Amino acid sequence: MPETTPVHPDSPLSAEQRELLDQVLDKWSLRVLETLCERPLRFNELRRAIPAVTQKSLTATLRRLERNGMVERVVTGTRPLAVEYRVAPLGKTLQDLVDALFGWTAANYAEVERARRRYDDETA
């Protein structure tokens, strides 16, 4: 039977819940969710929208997000058949949280940079 108790006694999350959180907070997952919240996209459109992601990483990320119910893969009835990815209703519930993370990053980046410089100067 899988472990269902928290990994750390102070943590309210089980190992499985922590794994889900790690998958959602993965850098490519956040970028894909952010991009798909704007509008549904086909694979190559999504890849162009996130130029740093490799085809392999994007495929793995989309499959993981689809498996977790965050993204839907829709086959369109056009000729030739096309596949479009869109945020699923469950994934839309993350939009405010993703926006908050990006907002926090923008608001605190200068302070993080100062901390990095201080650290680098002290450890050099």
Image: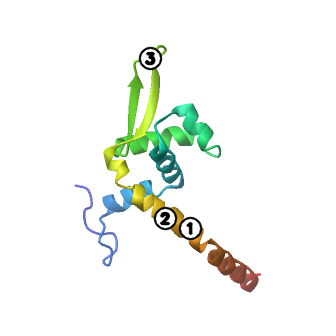
As drawn, 76 above or below 124 = above
Rendered location of residue 62, percent (x, y): 46, 40
Q: Residues within 10 Å of mark 2 (few under 14, many from 20)?
A: some
Find disc 1 in the rendering and name its residue: 105
Say above or below: 104 vs 26: below
Question: Is 123 located above or below residue 82 in the figure?
Answer: below
Q: Tell me, for residue 94, which label it has, or none.
A: none
**Residue plotted at (37% across, 46% down):** 70
Indicate the amino acid at tag 1: Thr
Q: CA distance from mark 3 to mark 1?
A: 40 Å
Residue occupying image coordinates x 49% and y 64%: 101
> Can you say whether 42 is above or below 51 in the image?
above
Q: What mark, if any, has residue 101 been given in the picture?
A: 2
Foreground pick, 56 / 44: 44
Residue located at (29% from left, 64% from top)? 14
Q: Amino acid at mark 3?
A: Thr
Point out which mark residue 78 bears.
3
